[in-house]
Amino acid sequence: MRYHVYLEDEPTLECYRLSHQPRPEYAPVFICPFVVLTDDDGQMYNAMRGIQGQSKNETMNMGVYRLDGQLDAQCPVLFPYAENPITERYHVTETPDAVSYVGQTWRFDFGVENYRWVDGSGRLDISARRLGQVCTFWVPQQEGYEYPQMLRSHLGKATGTLDGRPVEGLFMLDYIYSRPDAMWTEMGMLTKLHNVWLNWLVEYEDGGYEGGYAWRGRPGTDFAAAHHVVDGVSSARSDAEVTTQHTERGSVTKVDLALGKDSSLSLEQAGSTDWPLHTCGTVSSTSSDRVIAKSWNYTEFFPLNWSAVADYQAAHHKLYGRYPSFARLMKNGRVENQLLVFE
């Protein structure tokens, strides 16, 4: 598979609009911010919401979670879906400083280097500042890839409040592009490209920081895109080596990342949100001799037969007009040799 990884020029507001075309006949098919946060007591939280996840005119609320230290089961959902619906319509507004996406219980304000996210009718209210440059990977249309794939990633540091308590942590904003007629769920990113994806942010005691993202593609793709930023200096890389350790059920418990021969780090997972896909935790070590003060990581793992789950979800929606409960669907599952199996 042929792909490119590169750094972007300083973005403009145009880059955050639904009409943005980074290349001719490309358009955003999924816009997805997410956070991993901790409060003053060290309690960890996660939130994720996507624009155009399953419909061109709706957002998909992936949940706001309170991590509980369990890896083999989903942690508690902090905002009930009855109050914070899974899907909502939205409208778009603009000011000279931001492009805003606004729903009934949430809003995003995306500026050139500063972002704001309000969710749960104000229960979550965070601001984020971009760190380093925007980093993009691009998979052009080619044999086996009917839809081109492009992802522009923004790393940031988040601060704000959750239910009135101060929180801080990792912020990421991903803009995913393909043909304008495509849905994110049909462009092949989850079924042809993606196996493991991780994001991290470390703050050192000397006041500096390090962070980024890295990918491990499906077998045979040789996909190893990464963004590494240290104290404001970004590097786009294609030499990520990701190794995972798992529990008996198959949950990711530890991730080791090597970026060539010059940088490495280890991630420890503190809990699972929507098993088996997402885990959150900290950075336990880096190859730097600097002392870690604070850290956060977000890791996504897709079993290699995930297309079967996606097909089932689509069929359920076609028959019943709604998607099945994800937690109930996964209840009796486990992962063996990177394949999801059921009792």
Image (cartoon, rainbow, N blue to C red):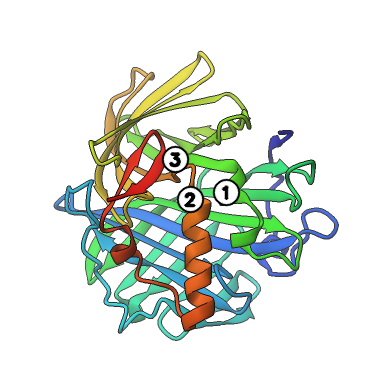
**Tag in front: 3 or 1:** 1
91 and 337: which is toward the camera: 337
Most distant residue in the front direction: 343
Q: Which residue is drawn at 61% across and 59% down?
A: 112
Residue 68 screen position, x and y as percent: 17, 53
194 and 94: which is toward the camera: 194
Asked which secondary structure carries label 3, the reply is strand
Q: Quickly name the residue at label 2.
A: 306
- Tags 1 and 2 touching, CB below 8 Å: yes
Q: Which residue is drawn at 41% across and 76% down?
A: 86
Q: What residue type is labelled 1?
A: Thr
Residue 309 screen position, x and y as percent: 46, 57
Q: Which image quarter: residue 104? A: bottom left
Most distant residue in the bottom direction: 104
Asked which secondary structure carries label 2, the reply is helix
Q: Quickly name the residue at label 3.
A: 198
Indicate the quadrant containing the N terminus: top left, top right, bottom left or bottom right: top right
Q: What residue type is labelled 2?
A: Trp
Residue 99 screen position, x and y as percent: 62, 71
Horizontal side, residue 138 vs residue 71: left or right: right
Q: Quickly name the residue at label 1.
A: 191
- Residue at mark 1 to residue at mark 2: CA–CA distance: 7 Å
Q: How many residues crowd mark 1 within 10 Å: few (<14), some (14–19), many (20+)?
A: some
> In the displayed structure, would residue 192 be above or below residue 61?
above
Residue 245 visible (yes or no): yes
Most distant residue in the left direction: 41
Q: Does label 1 or label 2 sit earlier along the sequence?
A: 1
- Residue at mark 3 to residue at mark 1: CA–CA distance: 17 Å
Asked which secondary structure carries label 1, the reply is helix
Horizontal side, residue 210 vs residue 325: left or right: right
> In the displayed structure, would residue 54 be above or below residue 73?
below
**Tag in front: 2 or 3:** 2
